[in-house]
Amino acid sequence: MEQSRPRNKDAVVEIVTQNVKSHLANLPDDLESKGNRASIYRIPEHIKKVNPNAFKPQLISFGPYHHGELHLMPTEKVKHLAFRYFEKRCGLSIEDMVNEVWDMLEDLQRSYDKLDDKWKTEPAKFLEIMILDGCFIIQVLLGRSPLWTLPLEDVLRDVLLLENQLPMKLLAKLCSMLMLEGEGEHNKNVESLVRESQKIPAYLKKMLMENDYSHILDMYRAELQYYEGNEQERHQISHTEMRFTHFEMIFGQLGMRLSHLGMGHEIQLARRFHKAGIKLKKGCNLRDVDFDQNKGVLSLPFIEMNANIESGLLNAMAFEKLLGIGNIVGSFVILMGNLLEKDEVDSFNQLAKGTVLGLWGHYPTVYKSVNNHCKRPWKIWWTTLKDVNFQSPWTIISTFYALIGFALLIIQTVYGVYGYYLPRPS
């Protein structure tokens, strides 16, 4: 019995060793290369639970993940029209365009995580959708759309979906083909087109150009972090309650959905901010979120509210989580969702079961400071007094006379009591 143990042990060790070596041998050679990492992902189910429709294209597909889905097929003909328009302005033959993109085929395929084998075994089909979809996006960014009547807002929504991204290197290659035409307005790179389509200001040009962005959603995430607003936006004074209303329209629903997944913090409702004397100051970007405890001023970034903001934020949040590049967008979404919707939630920033997401940077200090400020009863009392009695000159005058009348009543009462207990000497 004792002699059989070493033999069994050796056999088990040998089997495990061979199995592990086999697994390692099947790994791609470039798996650990950062430059070859995938940057376009399928959204995992545990993230989709937040809002499944926010990650799914509604009108048009870009790339292989949603290509051929029935509800997106009507727009395929629109892509063909866009390509014909692109080809005419480009001045290159279709064959020349295909040859240009062919050299980057494997690089484009590596950009997609968990790419179906059919796209690897059928490179012609993969290359076809890359070219057609890429030319369509370039046309959208150029604002050249005389041949179709698709709603631009819906198209831009689908452009910002993580599963609907096209590699930036592809768009750059296609955009460089337009430069061959020689027209001044087309002598632009794809980054400048994206900035113009998203109304990104010129001061971001240097910073954006110094970074190697993976796709349009990656640039959108950078805009959220570093946008500083124009002069009008920086100095515009917005009514506090109106600002809260706008934020609640978007982030309130996000906070409610995230809280259903167990995300959140113990923090007061935004409707209590005004009662606690908290004022809003317009910040510029996600890094500007701050709270001045001495002045009771909460700085929030200027974000253009539109129908696509929820989808854009959630996809940017999923991208930074899956790529592991920080969590500033996710932290902002969670913070705003809780500031504006939930009163008390037990768990701490849980994105999904088994996945914990901590707040970025100074955000924990912000929500703790807001909480402490809202818990001061005298601030609530003083703000309520001002709201009730100091909203107009007439209420101020009425309050002033009421205080005088109250003071006279006290004086009269004191003299009455004084005269009762201490009568005048006869």
Image: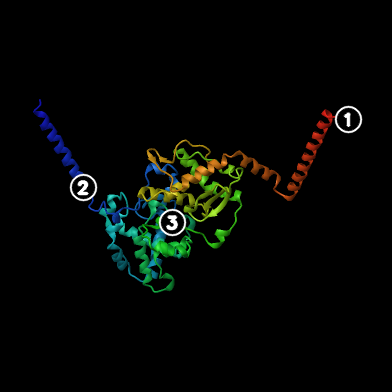
Can the viewer see residue 260 in this picture?
yes
Q: Can see residue 151?
A: no
Tell me: 125 left or right of 50: left
Give the numbered dot on residue 330.
none
**Is residue 80 or residue 376 the one in the foreground?**
376
Q: Nearer the viewer, residue 150 or 316?
A: 316
Label 1: few (<14), some (14–19) or many (≥20) C-alpha neighbours in 10 Å? few
Picture coordinates of residue 302, whole percent (x, y): 52, 55
> What amino acid type is highlighted by mark number 2?
Asn
Task: Name the element at disc 1.
Answer: loop
Q: Locate residue 168: give its quadrant.
A: bottom left
Q: Which residue is mark 3?
A: 220
x and y percentages locating residue 242 in the rendered image: 60, 50
Mark 3 to mark 2 CA distance (whole Å): 36 Å
Q: Quadrant of the C terminus?
A: top right
Write down the quadrant of residue 16 in the picture: top left
Nearest the camera: 78 or 252? Answer: 252
Three-letter code for the amino acid on which mark 3 is drawn: Tyr
Residue holding disc 2: 26
Mark 2 lies on a secondary structure that is loop
Foreground residue among 45 and 5:
5
Callout in the foreground (1, 3): 1
Of the numbered discs 3 and 2, the one sitting upstream in the chain is: 2
Does residue 180 appear to the left or right of 32 in the view shown? right
Identify the residue at horizontal 22%, vertical 52% (top origin). 29
Amino acid at the residue labelled 1: Pro
The answer to whether marks 1 and 3 mark residues whose Cβ atoms lie closer than 8 Å is: no
Residue 22 position within the rendered picture, expressed as x and y whole percent measured from the top left: 18, 44
Location of mark 1 (residue): 425
Q: Secondary structure at mark 3?
A: helix
Q: Which numbered disc flags the more N-terminal residue, 2 or 1? A: 2
